[in-house]
Image (cartoon, rainbow, N blue to C red):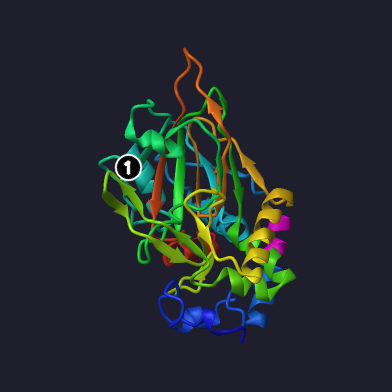
Amino acid sequence: YYGSDLSASANPFIHDSGEAAAKSPFALENESAYQAWRKAKLEQRQRLDASDVCALDSDGQFPRAALAALEQQIEAFNFIVFESCTVLDKPAFVELNRQLGLERLDVNLGADEDGITSLYAVDPDDERAAYIPYTNRAMNWHTDGYYNPDGQRISAFALYCINPAARGGDNYLFDHEYMYLLIRDQSAELIEALMSPDLMRIPANIEGNRVIRGEQSGPVFYLDGASGALQMRYTSRPRNIVWKSDKRSSRALNLVREILMDSDALIDIGLQKGQGLICNNILHGRQAYHDDSGYPVRLFYRARYYDAMRLPKEIRVAAGSGE
């Protein structure tokens, strides 16, 4: 309808042209499906509170009675916040994520041996200090793993606070589906531009004449071929990113930036000890922070997944029936 950029054959990020992708409300040709999704999304966002915190049970799991409400939070905002009465260890953190269908861990370069990343400000001589997550500096808007190759796309991630910073360090969030909604309401043509498979190019990461990661190109918005879900890859960083420079692409990218600067849909989350968030890789960033002497250093666990959040069918049915 809007051109060949959105076809499965032209866009390697749409892994197949199956029934789910064809019926997705995020496919531009499905205007009636989009309008139905849009109406439901806005009603849920108005009715629910994004800052609601789900208390885990004594086993460090989501209570069965809370699952229906969690599913609604995910549909409305694409993230949930939780808290535990005792601090979870890494295995318990992984098991909690598994309850929401998160199984396939992405083991990035800085991850610990178990695949979970311990985020804290490392010493300046540590090689990880070259990467902002391992410093106390502010992190601008991005989605996780925007540089990952096709087949290793990050669909969800989880953060868990072991120790908050003495000062600063809040996370800020923006639902990528709501970003899509705001842009599509203005211009379907700009959505098409943001789905162009050559919109965003990340040069290869080379250290000491060794290729750590090859060059990657792809869109900002794309569809998961198996589920039809909308996914996003984006970064506000000005270095090591090459954007397509035609007028339509520039207009689309400028609109994304304007929305992130001016929209009241930004959500600020200051996670405290024992609190965490799980999200479908929405846009997010982090304030700069400071660790004071005599105060525990800021430490978060992070787990990245190739899966998106979902409640197993049998649990969704039970939650919906009140069992």
Q: Residues within 10 Å of mark 1 (few under 14, many from 20)?
A: some
Q: Quadrant of the N terminus?
A: bottom right
User: Which residue is rendered at x = 63% and y = 79% of the image?
Assistant: 33
Seen from the viewer's position, the closer of residues 272 and 53 is 272
The location of residue 212, given as percent across then percent down, is: 30, 51
The location of residue 27, given as percent across then percent down, is: 58, 78
User: Which residue is rendered at x = 64% and y = 64% of the image?
Assistant: 250
Going by the image, does 49 lie left or right of 205? right
Q: Which residue is mark 1?
A: 111
The location of residue 19, given as percent across then percent down, is: 47, 84
Q: Is residue 53 visible?
A: yes
Question: Which quadrant would residue 207 be assigned to in this image?
Answer: top left
Outermost residue toward the bottom in this view: 1
SS for dot 1: loop
Going by the image, does 285 lie left or right of 207? right
223 up-or-down from 157: above or below: below
The location of residue 141, given as percent across then percent down, is: 57, 48
Q: Which residues are drawn in magenta?
A: 41-47
Seen from the viewer's position, the closer of residues 37 and 172 is 172
Outermost residue toward the top in this view: 294
114 up-or-down from 322: above or below: above
* Residue 96 inside the magenta-drawn segment: no
Question: Which quadrant would residue 213 be assigned to in this image?
Answer: bottom left
